[in-house]
Image: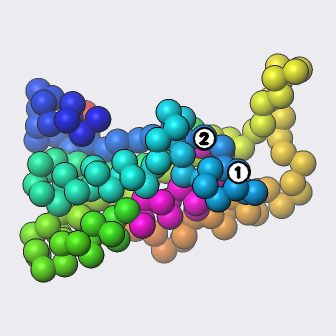
């Protein structure tokens, strides 16, 4: 993905990369943070952020996930944050690389939370009576990335 973005026509236009991940398997931690393709979200994020640190993706603005269940946002955001922290630690003596890494925002665009039943071919809401409250708690109200999305919109990014 990153190599394709390096070859694009307008290399100065800010962009973000969004991933679609498999549903979270609460009983198996090894199944958390897995892309729909089967690849590790954290490993891929590490590789992309490493390119950003090296200055190879100067206009990379963020990494995130889309169309994921709201309950998965915290787990998947943690995968991205861990990758960012590992790359940041590896470059702690390079102030320019650290600045580039810090400018990679973590984004999420969850789905509505409805569950698809392949037997009835219908969507329904989960039976969890606290679902709405839990999904609201997944987002840190102090998170500055929401303001960054507004700034992204103002920039009229491609």
Q: Residues within 10 Å of mark 2 (few under 14, many from 20)?
A: some
In the image, the segment drawn in magenta is 68-82
Instruction: Report helix, strand or loop for mark 1.
Output: loop
Q: Tell me the residue that label 1 is attached to.
A: 25
Q: Quadrant of residue 123?
A: top right
Pointer 1 with pointer 2, Cβ within 8 A = yes
Residue 69, horizontal then vertical, whole percent = 65, 46
From where the camera sits, is residue 66 visible?
no
Q: Residue at x 33, y 69 (%)?
A: 86
| Residue 73 on the magenta segment | yes
Residue 81 seen anywhere in this rendered image of the structure: yes
Tell me the tag on residue 22. Answer: 2
How many residues crowd mark 1 within 10 Å: few (<14), some (14–19), many (20+)?
few
Above/below status of 21 relative to 49: above
Q: At x 28% / y 51%, what residue is drawn? A: 47
Label 1 to label 2: alpha-carbon separation: 9 Å
- SS type, badge 2: loop
> Residue drawn at (24%, 39%), measured in percent from left and top?
2
Residue 153 x %, y %? 32, 45
122 vs 16: above or below: above
Direction from residue 62 to residue 125 in the image, left or right: right
Q: Quadrant of the N terminus?
A: top left
Instruction: Give the residue at x 64% y 59%.
Output: 29
- Vertical arrangement, residue 21 with respect to residue 117, above or below: below
């Amino acid at each position: 993905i990153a190599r394709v973005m390096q070859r694009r026509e307008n290399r100065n236009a800010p962009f973000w990369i969004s991933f679609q991940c498999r549903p979270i398997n609460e009983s198996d931690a090894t199944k958390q943070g897995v892309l729909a393709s089967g690849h590790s979200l954290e490993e891929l994020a590490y590789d992309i952020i490493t390119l950003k640190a090296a200055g190879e993706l100067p206009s990379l603005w963020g990494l995130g996930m889309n169309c994921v269940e709201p309950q998965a946002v915290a787990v998947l955001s943690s995968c991205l944050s861990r990758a960012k922290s590992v790359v940041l630690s590896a470059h702690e003596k390079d102030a320019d690389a650290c600045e580039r890494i810090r400018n990679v925002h973590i984004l999420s665009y969850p789905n509505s939370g409805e569950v698809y039943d392949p037997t009835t071919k219908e969507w329904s809401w989960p039976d969890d009576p606290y679902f709405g409250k839990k999904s609201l708690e997944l987002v840190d109200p102090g998170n500055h990335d929401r303001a960054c999305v507004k700034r992204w919109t103002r920039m009229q990014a491609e």
